[in-house]
Amino acid sequence: MLKNFVLKMIELKRFDDLLNLLIEDSDYSSDSMNNIPQIKDEIEQYTLSVHHIHFLKKFGATDQVVVDKDGSVYKWYIDYFNKWLENGVKGLEMIEVENYLKDHPFPTI
């Protein structure tokens, strides 16, 4: 469910809402700690996945290294992102997703 939620949010370009949920800066953030990253690999996957989503928001889906106008260099972290998805999307809580979807359901075809 969490993996599909993340992929759908990206498909719908709901980057800000997704990032706010991930960084606990959302109206739907909770005190739940059921799915927090705890070990080094989980923390690294979570952190680089947040960077990856920022990259997708700013530059779209490209594996190219991008140099911004101010000289900052950006790249995507698709490998870490995919591992993060496969390892349970640590850092995103199911209760927060459920509450978000009550107010912002995905469009149906």
Image: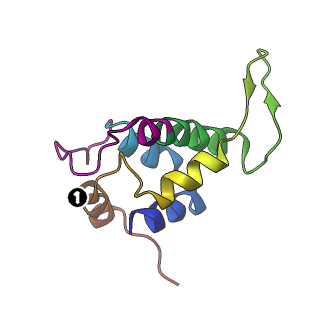
Q: Residue at x 56, y 61 (%)?
A: 12
Q: Is residue 53 left or right of residue 38?
A: right
Q: Which residue matches tag 1?
A: 95
The total of numbered circles placed on residues is 1
Name the residue nearer the viewer: 57 or 52. Answer: 52
Q: Residue at x 56, y 57 (%)?
A: 10
Q: Judge whether residue 59 is colored magenta.
A: no
Name the residue nearer the viewer: 18 or 73. Answer: 73
Q: Which residues are magenta?
A: 25-44
Q: Is residue 26 left or right of residue 19?
A: left
**Quarter of the rendering occupied by the N terminus:** bottom left
- 71 relative to 15, above or below: above
- The location of residue 104, given as percent across then percent down, is 36, 62
Few, some or many residues within 10 Å of mark 1 (<14, 14–19, 20+): some
Q: Residue at x 39, y 43 (%)?
A: 22
Q: What's the magenta bit mostly, secondary-structure-wise? A: loop
The amino acid pointed to by label 1 is: Ile
Q: Secondary structure beneath disc 1?
A: helix
Q: Residue furthest bottom?
A: 109
The colour scheme applied to this rendered structure is rainbow
Q: Is residue 83 left or right of residue 40?
A: right
Q: Judge whether residue 37 is colored magenta.
A: yes
Q: Residue furthest top?
A: 70
Residue 25 shows up from this direction: yes
Residue 14 shows up from this direction: no
Q: Quadrant of residue 106?
A: bottom left
- The location of residue 86, given as percent across then percent down, is 49, 61
- The location of residue 15, given as percent across then percent down, is 53, 48
- The location of residue 61, given as percent across then percent down, is 73, 51
Q: Quadrant of residue 55?
A: top right
Name the residue nearer the viewer: 108 or 89. Answer: 89
